[in-house]
Image (cartoon, rainbow, N blue to C red):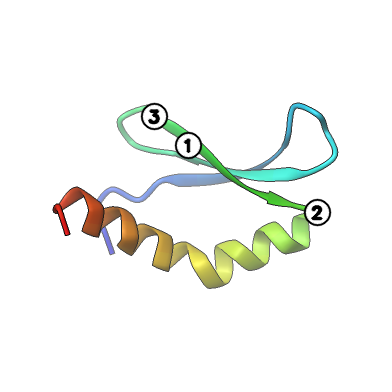
Amino acid sequence: MTQATPVLQIRHTDAGDNLTVAAAWPDGRIEEFGSFKNETEANEWIAHKFNDWIREIETARKGG
């Protein structure tokens, strides 16, 4: 896993009907992604897909 891991927060969308996951990176960038019906879905994504997402980002940054 990457040395710079973001802090994650589950947030309501602007419309308020779904949730997103916000990733706050150490350099101050914030990325919001996903559209989840409830907090359980968002937490399941974090538990089961977050590490894959981090690996994809690392691969993309390395040009692969």
The reply to whether callout 3 and callout 1 are in contact (CB within 8 Å) is yes
Location of residue 11 in the rendering, given as x and y in whole percent from the top left corner? 69, 39
- Circle 3 is placed at which residue position? 29
Mark 2 crowd level (few <14, some 14–19, many ≥20, 10 Å Cα): few
Outermost residue, right direction?
17
For disc 2, the marked residue is 37
| Disc 3/disc 2 C-alpha distance (Å) | 25 Å
Residue carrying label 1: 31
For the N terminus, which image quadrant?
Answer: bottom left
Vertical position of residue 33 compared to residue 53: above or below = above
Q: Give the residue type that dot 2 points to.
A: Lys
Crowd band around label 3 with a 10 angstrom C-alpha radius: few (<14), some (14–19), many (20+): few
Alpha carbon separation for disc pair 2 and 1: 19 Å
**In which quadrant of the rendered view does residue 39 lie?**
bottom right
Residue drawn at (66%, 44%) of the image: 20
Of 35 and 1, nearer the camera is 35
Say what secondary structure mark 2 lies in.
loop
